[in-house]
Image (tube, grey):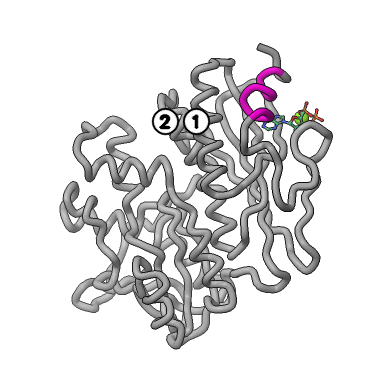
Amino acid sequence: MGEFELIRRYFAAAPCARGGPGVALGIGDDCALLAPAPGEQLAVSTDTLTAGVHFPDPCPDAFGLGQRALAVSASDLAAMGAAPLGFTLALTLPSVEPAWLEGLAAGLAQMAEQCELRLVGGDTTRGPLSLTLTVFGRVPAGQALLRSGARPGDLLCLGGAPGEAGGALPFVLGQRAPEGDACRHLLARYWAPQPQFDLGLWLRGRATAAQDVSDGLVADCGHIAAASGVRLVVETARLPVSSALAELFPADEVLRLALGAGDDYLLVFTLPPEQAPALAVAWPQAQVIGRVEAGSGVAVLAADGQPMTLAQTGFQHF
Ligand code: ADP
Ligand code: MG
């Protein structure tokens, strides 16, 4: 199968490549043409997933990889309060294996449909397996959710129970035998994270700062703290606890995963206190987990209210 047949069969012919609102021209020309409405800004983000770094190599679950690759990129749009528009896929493959490619394309298509993102272009090359996805969203000018707006007195909030994708890792890596409903739940959170688009849209005009948790809760809170010039206080007693994690791991490990494991793609955000009642009604799974103070950095308070010291906060490549 040649390069162009591969592109046509697995990508250009996919339902998510058919175009849609805001896509004036999709796959097939030198560029795609995107057309956000007048008064909107284009939100753009790129993520690379490399075999052996971001997912197991070899990767038996091509479908899961396709879903996950798009979800992690799409989550950046959600974190900006952007509505989905389209994405491109730069795919590097060591060889053409039709069954594997079919799985990858199907996983991508499924997540694309779920996120309402259209595949508008890409590139296909030979080399060690990696995927680079660039996602495009649209947001009314000036209304994107930035990391830089948190103010002392705001509440620190999280879009759900953290640590579940991190809890799936021993099963993904084959260190533990995958059995039971709780394990299946964690694996689904790892392979098919759900970008919180609706929450992001709801936060527009309400939240003072937001981002998605990709490197670990404490590490990512650190980015908001630095960008906003404030101190974030995480009260561990207020963290939502995943029942699946609680079933499979001892309590101290659940807490370690909640604070330090990345890959959940929940939104973490700061909210003026007067917005808290509306949040509780509209997003019962979201939770106030702490507060914003004057100062710098991130403080984590143990259940007894005393500051904890953490060995390592979040994943870094270098
Ligand atoms: P060019 O040489 O002009 O960069 P290519 O031959 O690489 O174009 O690609 C032809 C068309 O197919 C372009 O519209 C490109 O965006 C699209 N394309 C290439 N690879 C992929 C892919 N993996 N997924 C989606 N579209 C792709
Ligand atoms: Mg090209």
> Residue lying farthest top?
1
Instruction: Read off the residue under disc 1.
Output: 51
> Ligand 2, what quadrant?
top right
Q: Is residue 229 visible?
A: no
Choose between 103 and 165: the one closer to the eye: 103
Q: Is residue 157 above or below residue 162?
A: below
Left or right placement of residue 157 versus residue 254 in this view: right
In percent of the image, x 53 and y 34: which residue is there? 50
Which residue is under mark 2?
56
Q: Amino acid at mark 1?
A: Ala
- Residue drawn at 54 percent across, 23 percent down: 101
Q: Magenta stretch: residue 306 in it? A: no
Q: Position of residue 141 (x, y in %)?
A: 73, 70
User: Is 11 one of the magenta-colored residues?
Assistant: yes
Q: Quadrant of residue 10?
A: top right
Whether residue 209 can be seen here: yes
Q: Residue at x 48, y 58 (%)?
A: 196
Left or right of 44 in this view: 62? left
Of pointers 1 and 2, the one earlier in the residue sequence = 1
Which residues, given as a range, are shown in magenta? Answer: 5-13
Q: Amino acid at mark 2?
A: Pro
